[in-house]
Amino acid sequence: MQVLSASQFFLVSDVLSLCIAAFAAASLFFWFGRSQVSSHYKTALTITGLVTFIAFYNYWRLFDSWDATYTVVNGVISATGVPYNQIYRYTDWLLTVPLLLIELILVMRLPQAETISRAWKLGSAAALMILLGYFGQVSGANDSAPRLIGGVLSMIPFLYIVFALYSGLGEAIERQPETARGLVRLARNLTVVAWFFYPIVYFLPFVVSFDGGTITTVIQIGYAVADLTAKVIFGLLIYTIAVRKSEAEGMKA
Amino acid sequence: MQVLSASQFFLVSDVLSLCIAAFAAASLFFWFGRSQVSSHYKTALTITGLVTFIAFYNYWRLFDSWDATYTVVNGVISATGVPYNQIYRYTDWLLTVPLLLIELILVMRLPQAETISRAWKLGSAAALMILLGYFGQVSGANDSAPRLIGGVLSMIPFLYIVFALYSGLGEAIERQPETARGLVRLARNLTVVAWFFYPIVYFLPFVVSFDGGTITTVIQIGYAVADLTAKVIFGLLIYTIAVRKSEAEGMKA
């Protein structure tokens, strides 16, 4: 196990706990918001709340798993030998990443056939990206060849998604009504920027040593910030877009 | 560890447990109340309930952490060596203090641009205040220089918030309709009075010794009273304001 100080251990605990509360609160906020948008945007808000709800669940699991890895007694930290199960992150992403793309497509209120086709393509690509990353992650040590191959392969759907968000969906964004266009563009850009954090962390061990308490602490906090950005802040943008478009369209709930 | 008597230990446990129930009940009350106010005030009540919900979660964590610090067997109390994690208070405040200011702004129903600008300014100042206090809190012993510096720095956003509540927002309060003005003023004043408790506790160890069971017990109960006041009683004022204004405006739900 890495050499972690007691204060680093508690810092990660506290950040995981903050995420649990923030994700749960976000879900409730989005679901209560359903009554404040027109029927066309209710499903987008349902799914926005599901994403943070799934994250709430998985962060609870991460918190408990982290808590089991160390004990601190009279200020002295010792590893219990129980591993920290980071795979909860992958089981989270496998569900939430396709849903995040679907909530963005839904709030755009495209023609039905276009919604279904784009949701299938982007959703499947996102699931494939996470699965390939998962197989890489579990197949070997932090700097092993199978892990590298899984990561490189998962970059293919990743780059396809980024391309699709700027080409096909990009054109659809430019057709959004004036009141929402800037916010939809911002939501799309925020997603892409936040998502770049994940492959960076994945590939980092091939460049620098991943042992040591400081890097562990930085990565756990980095994931938390990236998840809060990609799910809660992104979700607040989706909520704002749904409210503005409902108002602009005369809010026939 | 401090020398705590068994009865002091149980007193703090019981107060923490009372808070868990009170915060959960308050959330449900505010959320049920959403259907009794006009659409303009629903978001204020959603957020009022989220503040007590986040407090409910963090008091549950505080209760479990407190419970792990001591055992009482056959009337004899002994410290387990596991620390009491007070940082749950900071992770709570980091989310709830900005939200408390936002619920006050939302219930005032100011023009949209003014709402957004005031929410951003007060919310960011509140988050900065808590973060500086947090860094002070974790950086050293109860009477160390870094802790003093963190505390003094966090007083800058604190005083800015108090100033803003009485100058800029104070003017906006005077523009509130007759039926609500007194209550909004009261909510503002209650916030400021309740909030003064927190820096007093923070700076107290620089004046008197912080060891001993009595001071620990007094501080835990003091925090509980301050949190119940700033979140539940404040929330009840927000609820009353929302109901009165909905009635005065003809309640077009």
Image (spheres, coloured by chain):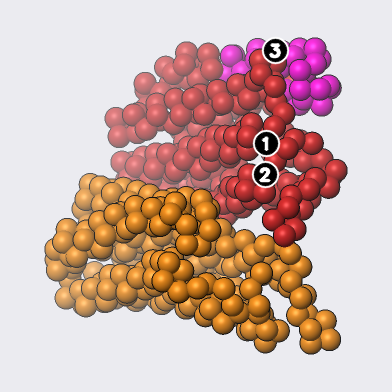
Chain colours: A red, B orange
Query: Sequence order check: which comes first, mark 3 or mark 1?
Result: 3
The reply to whether callout 2 and callout 1 are in contact (CB within 8 Å) is: yes
Nearer to us in this view, A220 or A133: A220
Three-letter amino acid code at the position of disc 1: Gly
Q: Quadrant of the N terminus of chain B?
A: bottom right
Q: CA distance from mark 2 to mark 3?
A: 33 Å
**Around disc 2, counting alpha carbons within 10 Å, would you say few (fewer than 14), some (14 to 19), or many (20 or more)?**
some
Q: Position of residue A76 (x, y in %)?
A: 73, 52
Q: Position of residue B29 (x, y in %)?
A: 49, 74
Task: Tell me the residue at 84%/86% (across/down).
Answer: B74
Label 3 marks a residue whose chain is A
Residue at the disc numbered 1? A213
The magenta segment is A133-161
Labels 3, 1: front one: 1
Q: Is residue B205 above or below residue A74?
A: below
Locate residue A102: give its quadrant.
Answer: top right
Locate residue A101: give its quadrant.
Answer: top right
Residue at the disc numbered 2? A5
Residue at the disc numbered 3? A152
Q: Quadrant of the C terminus of chain B?
A: bottom left
Task: Tell me the residue at 44%/18% (across/down).
Answer: A170
Query: Sequence order check: which comes first, mark 2 or mark 1?
Result: 2
Task: Tell me the residue at 59%/14% (across/down).
Answer: A160
Labels 2, 3: front one: 2
Q: For numbered disc 3, what is the local secondary structure?
A: helix
Q: Is label 2 on the same chain as label 3? A: yes
Label 1 marks a residue whose chain is A
Query: Sequence order check: which comes first, mark 2 or mark 3?
Result: 2
Three-letter amino acid code at the position of disc 3: Val
- Taking the image as shown, residue B32 lies to the left or right of residue B11, namely left
Q: For numbered disc 2, what is the local secondary structure?
A: loop
